[in-house]
Image (cartoon, helix red, strand yellow):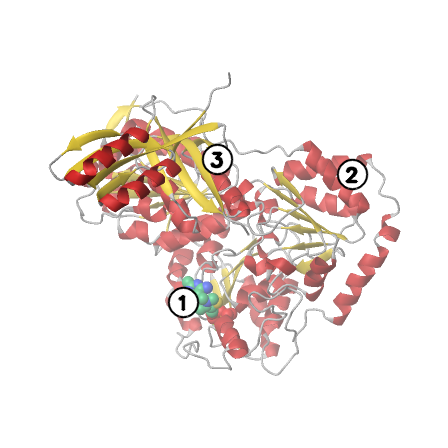
Amino acid sequence: MKLTGSQIMMEVLKSEGVDTIFGFPGGAVLDIYDALDKTDIRHILVRHEQGAVHAADGYARASGKVGVCLVTSGPGATNTVTGIASSYMDSIPVVVITGQVPSHLIGNDAFQEVDIVGITRPCTKHNYLVSRIEDLAVILKEAFHLARTGRPGPVLVDIPKDLTSASIEFECPKDVRLKSYNPNYKPNMRQLKKVVQLIQEAKRPMIFSGGGVILANASKELTEFTHKTRMPLTSSLMGLGAFPGTDPLWLGMIGMHGTYRANMSTSECDLLISIGVRFDDRVTGKTDAFAAQANIVHIDIDPTSIRKNIPVSVPIVGDCKISLEQLNRLIDEIDLGDLSKRRGEWLDLIEQWKNTNPLAYTQDEIIKPQYVVEKLYELTGGEAIITTEVGQNQMWAAQYYHFNKPNHFITSGGLGCMGFGLPAAIGAQVACPDKMVVDIAGDGSIQMNSQEMATAVQFNLPVKIVILNNGYLGMVRQWQELFYEKRYACTSMEHCPDFVKLAEAYGAIGLRAVTPEEVSPVLKEGLSIPKPVIMDFTVAKEEGVYPMVPAGAPITEMLLV
Amino acid sequence: MEMEKHIFTMLVDNQPGVLSRVAGLFSGKGFNIESLVTAETDTPLISRITIVTKANKPVIEQIEKQLNKLVNVIKIRDVTGPEAVKREMALICVKARPEHRGEILRIVDIFRCKIIDIGLEHYIMEVTGDSDKINALLKLLRPMGIKKIARTGTMALIREPN
Ligand SMILES: Cc1ncc(C[n+]2csc(CCOP(=O)(O)OP(=O)(O)O)c2C)c(N)n1
Ligand SMILES: [Mg+2]
């Protein structure tokens, strides 16, 4: 059967099970849009291409499927770069399709020509410029395969316009074979046995899990492993939700804004079993002092993650789910003895740390941002999908909303990209229409992609936006307060729009709370409205996120409230 | 930590942009490239790239793993040790005053170079060998006056098992 390039694309997308595309049209992708319009694939028209990638990212995280974007050449393509970089840092499977000027114009500085493959080379898992229509289907298949397998990540496919209208005989390629790409899923058994040996010998063992566990869909196995071995567990920001945040063995998050007990435990433990993490500097602080007394086990699908930042005793390259399954089996074969006795002293010590320095804030006559997050947790029963912007809002969300399930906390962890939360919430809501989806936002960040309110309204996506409005670029202000003698250079958000009116202008609902008494009623009302809602909470202007480890210090050197 | 010199040789897809991925990896991650040589192999779809780099042990490990992670890198080997033969080539244009001609020719002979161009005032010679040999040759020629030089990086090939 003869098909055009655009029709071929649709066939491949369908064969990959794509039901939704986030995109924005333009000259170079007119043929693709014409073909798309004749399919059942849903197109969510964003208002900025950055939003398209963040939405695809949120969609991917909430659904476990590959998120797909379609944008035009030139500015359409360059607008995706920040989104791609965020997905790359967090290993999120996204396929970004960009239109390109016709083949014969490439290199001519043609209208809306940009070398997007060159630009995104360092922030994609892989990328392609399709130069022959014969390769189009295979490349698209490869793109999906690369995006979702191994350590997932964004893949960009740049398609010159002439290829989208040319026709060839088409047969959908079945399986993808890449001779140079074979991620290793199976962990080495001998190494796993070493881990079990270390667990048997350890006096103060603990687990440190990360986003890799969620990506590998291994939270059940992780929870089982933790309970079987009765080891306390901490996680990185990206790992929140893989293990229940209300479990007695949960230590809270690790790192710069980790809990006192998580950071102390990491320093004092003699065995740290790290699974699906990459030892980011926000986690480790000063690396020499990190888990200095511990044997470190590191399980990860990506060999480059291992020994990149931290020396480890037992490196294991493999899939987190398979590794944990095997570990659970090995643990079943041995006798760990009376675990409550065995772990007693260690868990008591941790309990003391918890009691001396719990996560805490003081109530006041003005609304405390932490209080808003706590109330949100209560009123949603911990069941909402939470996305965040970046800054203090993000950290308070991580600290005060207890995530009991994976894929419920969606944040720009590695890139720390302001403007992520709203489009990501839109993507998550598309993936999970029956879920409550809430973006915990800052007054600064929300303005970076607030245009996506229009998208939410147009597509009836009832996302909720909770703005913790402190009138500042709060996280930066906090650093200025602590490390620049309170010189608040350019961090005051003196002029924000009236967010209630902004919501209304978009055809959404706007609500506001200015006193602590109004918090619950506003949340209750906002959460009950089946439409997009902005809730603007006027919170304490100079509240800080604590504990805080100054950049580069050992994680035990925490500034406390 | 001590810096070590390592030679990596890899087979890569012979496609536009692949060299840029490899070079971009080095610049993006702050790895150092001492030399880089690339050309098509006997199979037109595959090229060989050989890179000489210097770093401490953990970084060397990272370099190898990161290169391996590139989708277009088919196979990579660390060929620093004696299991591989290594050669470099240089073209050297040296000033050839009448009183130096004899000396230069003697050096050419000892180093088994080849004179490939002669003028009234110069010789251009071709030499292959390991870096040390080429450096030694340059040292001897320098007093005569080296006008220009073109040097390849190191190429390497693993010996076949006997
Ligand atoms: C795109 C982008 N630009 C700049 C920054 C640096 N930055 C980190 S947090 C922050 C403040 C964010 O302010 P707001 O959204 O009001 O959040 P708050 O910290 O006040 O909760 C800034 C500017 C960033 N992370 N992302
Ligand atoms: Mg703010």
Identify the chain of the residue marked 2, using the numbered disc in the image.
Answer: A
Query: Can see residue A224?
Result: yes
Q: Could you tell me how far apart the alpha carbons at marks 2 and 1 are, in whole angstroms?
A: 50 Å
Q: Where does residue A377 sit, x and y in percent of width and height?
A: 63, 63
Q: Could you tell me how far apart the alpha carbons at marks 3 and 2 are, in whole angstroms?
A: 42 Å
Q: Which residue is mark 2?
A: A331
The image shows residue B90, relative to residue A54, as above or below, that is above
Question: What amino acid is at disc 1?
Answer: Gln
Q: Which residue is mark 3?
A: B80
State the image quarter where residue B126 is shown.
Answer: top left
Question: What amino acid is at disc 2?
Answer: Ile
Secondary structure type for disc 2:
helix
Query: Can see residue A102?
Result: no
Question: Same chain, marks 3 and 1?
Answer: no
Do labels 2 and 1 touch, CB within 8 Å?
no
| Residue beneath the point at 63% across and 73% down | A559
* Mark 1 sits near ligand 1, with its Cβ under 8 Å away: no
Identify the chain of the residue marked 3, using the numbered disc in the image.
Answer: B
Front residue (pair A421, A333): A333
Secondary structure type for disc 3:
loop
